[in-house]
Amino acid sequence: MKTKRKYPNLYLAAGLCLLAMAVGAAVDATTSRAQKTGEEAATFTRVTASWTAQPTDAAAAPATDVHDPRQTAAAVTVAPNKPYSGDFRLPMGSDIHKPFSGGEPVYSETMGDWRAHNGTDFAGSVGNDVHAAADGKVLRVYDDSFWGTVMEIDHGNGLTLRYCGLQSGSCLPEGAMVEKGARIAALGHIPLEMETDHLHLEALIDGELVDPMAALNKANTAE
């Protein structure tokens, strides 16, 4: 004979209560973790916002010295003997083989074509002395595949002369100070203009190629 269970409804109610308590605890734990994560995120956001705002703070920005001498152009003093009006010497006499063409093409016997001639060619013989057109400082001495050995001299007031076709090893060194009329090198060869022995002289004023004879105040006179 089976024994009937007593109070079945009481057990069911107790079970439901335990289940409800477990669910409630889990929800509370999840809510607590969510609240904590939210608080941490809010704290991180505030710190980040504070950090990114610092560079825009005028008090924290580095000061800029608008009078920094390194950013200020120095005054330029121009001496009276400007190019075109000074007293210059022609570097190799007055026998001009080919004049400055002023951008107009002229025939090149060596290259067999027509091209602008950017300098003045002074006739001479290999080994002849080449002289400084004026006082100055040797800026560069280098070998060029077209123009042979080249010497650049700063003659002041924006005038730089390129003496092309010199004899290798005969030139004054870079940095040397020269006086007007002083020997600076011996004449050599110019690969681009091999038809005759001559000095090819180029003149630049403030970096722009100009007629060397005009720059040396010799446009209408011979030495």
Image (cartoon, rainbow, N blue to C red):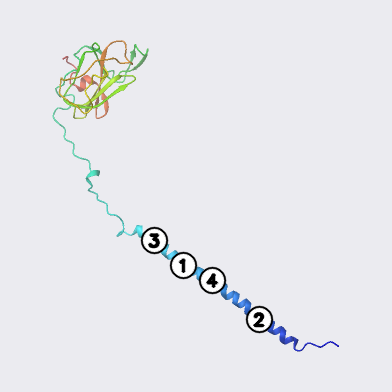
Q: CA distance from mark 3 to mark 1?
A: 14 Å
Query: Crowdedness of circle 1 by 10 Å Cα count: few (<14), some, many (20+)?
Result: few
Name the amino acid type tagged 2: Leu
Q: Height in image: 62 above or below 175? A: below
Q: Measuring 42% from the left and 65% from the top, which residue is drawn there?
A: 46
User: Where is 134 relative to 109, above or below?
Assistant: below
SS state under label 1: helix
Residue type at mark 4: give it: Arg
* Residue type for callout 3: Trp
- The residue under the point 41% across, 62% down is 49
Q: Is residue 57 left or right of residue 182?
A: right
Q: Which mark is residue 18?
A: 2
Whichever of callouts 3 and 1 sits on the residue coming sooner in the sequence is 1
Question: Mark 2 to mark 3: distance in Å?
Answer: 50 Å
Q: Position of residue 175 (x, y in %)?
A: 21, 28
Q: What is the number of the mark on residue 136? A: none
Label 2 secondary element: helix
Q: How many residues crowd mark 2 within 10 Å: few (<14), some (14–19), many (20+)?
A: few
Q: Which residue is mark 3?
A: 51
Q: Position of residue 208 (x, y in %)?
A: 27, 27
123 lies above or below 143: above
Contact flag, marks 2 and 4 (Cβ < 8 Å): no
Residue 212 visible from this viewpoint: yes
Toward which corner of the image does residue 153 lie, by quadrant? top left
Nearer to us in this view, 158 or 24: 24
Disc number lying in front (4 or 3): 4
Residue 123 drawn above or below residue 36: above
Query: Which residue is label 1 attached to?
Result: 42
**Element carrying mark 3:** helix
The residue beneath circle 4 is 33
**Label 4 – label 3 distance at C-alpha:** 27 Å
Pick the front one: 167 or 38: 167
